[in-house]
Image: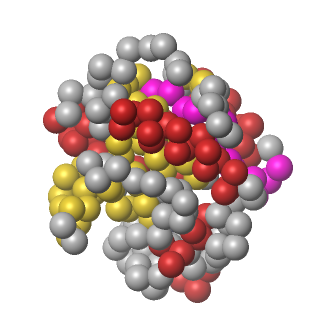
């Protein structure tokens, strides 16, 4: 296991949802293959009693980002559908915090920092930044989907908010609408001070 100071660290898993995995309506190629790394990250942070955050797209059926509204994407992660649900094998600690984004018809959001805490069946007003600060978090480790959109946006917002930010390179996959989009996203993140780290997989 990596030997580093986790005492002020949190884990953020971005949008590991059925619609972003193969078979989903907005599938990230090989998006399912991040599963072993994501699960090890979740288990590792849980075993160290560190905060774990899951962000998810939670779109109304007529969301502004959808093609039928003139947006760039097919309908995805619609509220109440299986496409919104987590990748099925993912085991989620009960203590994890869940942030929903893109839940208003006319507002899109890529970054988890645009999300709000979802708790006990309602979406609260609490932002991810406030939540992390209230848990004395200063460093965030990020994995999930998609590298060139929501992971990138979340990582850039994390550095802007002043968190030490590390993206786990083998825990992300990109959409690659254009072939080099993921490489460009990694370069942009690096340029803005995001650390890139490969997680040493134990069983994957
Ligand atoms: Zn979306």
Residue 48 in the image, given as x and y percentages of width and height:
34, 28
* Residue 103 visible somewhere in the drawing: yes
Q: Is residue 124 magenta?
A: no
Q: Position of residue 189 (x, y in %)?
A: 58, 31
Report which quarter residue 91 is drawn in: bottom left
| Coloring scheme used | secondary structure
View extreme (front): residue: 203
Total numbered labels placed on residues in the image: 0
Left/right placement of residue 133 relative to residue 70 reads: left
Above or below — where is 78 with respect to 46? below
Quadrant assignment for the C terminus: top right
Is residue 163 in sight in this rendering?
no
Residue 167 sits inside the magenta stretch: yes
Q: Position of residue 199 (x, y in %)?
A: 60, 28
Q: Residue at x 62, y 31 (%)?
A: 202
Residue that appears at 34% across and 50% down = 93
- Left or right, 17 with respect to 175, comes to left
Q: Main structural element of the magenta stretch: helix, strand or loop?
A: strand
Q: Nearer the viewer, residue 188 or 35?
A: 35
Image-based side of 28 in relation to 162, left or right: right
Q: Which residues are magenta?
A: 165-179
Residue lying at 80% horizontally and 44% vertically, measured from the top left: 180
- Note whether 141 is above or below 90 in the view shown: above
Q: Which of the 4 image quarters holds residue 27? A: bottom right
**Vertical placement of residue 157 versus 29, above or below:** above
């Amino acid at each position: 296991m990596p030997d580093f100071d986790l005492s002020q660290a949190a884990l953020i898993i971005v949008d590991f949802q059925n619609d972003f995995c193969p078979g989903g309506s907005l599938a990230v190629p090989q998006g399912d293959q991040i599963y072993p790394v994501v699960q090890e990250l979740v288990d590792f942070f849980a075993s160290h009693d560190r905060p774990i955050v899951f962000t998810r797209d939670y779109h109304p059926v007529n969301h502004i980002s959808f093609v039928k509204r003139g947006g760039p994407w097919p309908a995805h992660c619609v509220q109440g559908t299986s496409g919104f649900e987590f990748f099925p094998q993912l085991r989620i600690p009960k203590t994890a915090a869940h942030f929903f984004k893109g839940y208003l018809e006319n507002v899109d959001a890529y970054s988890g920092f645009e999300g709000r805490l979802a708790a006990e069946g309602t979406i609260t007003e609490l932002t991810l930044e406030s939540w992390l600060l209230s848990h004395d978090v200063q460093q965030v480790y990020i994995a999930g989907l998609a590298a060139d959109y929501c992971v990138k946006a979340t990582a850039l917002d994390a550095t802007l908010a002043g968190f030490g930010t590390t993206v786990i390179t083998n825990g992300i996959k990109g959409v690659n609408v254009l072939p080099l989009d993921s490489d460009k996203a990694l370069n942009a993140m690096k340029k803005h001070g995001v650390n890139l780290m490969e997680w040493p997989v134990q069983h994957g």
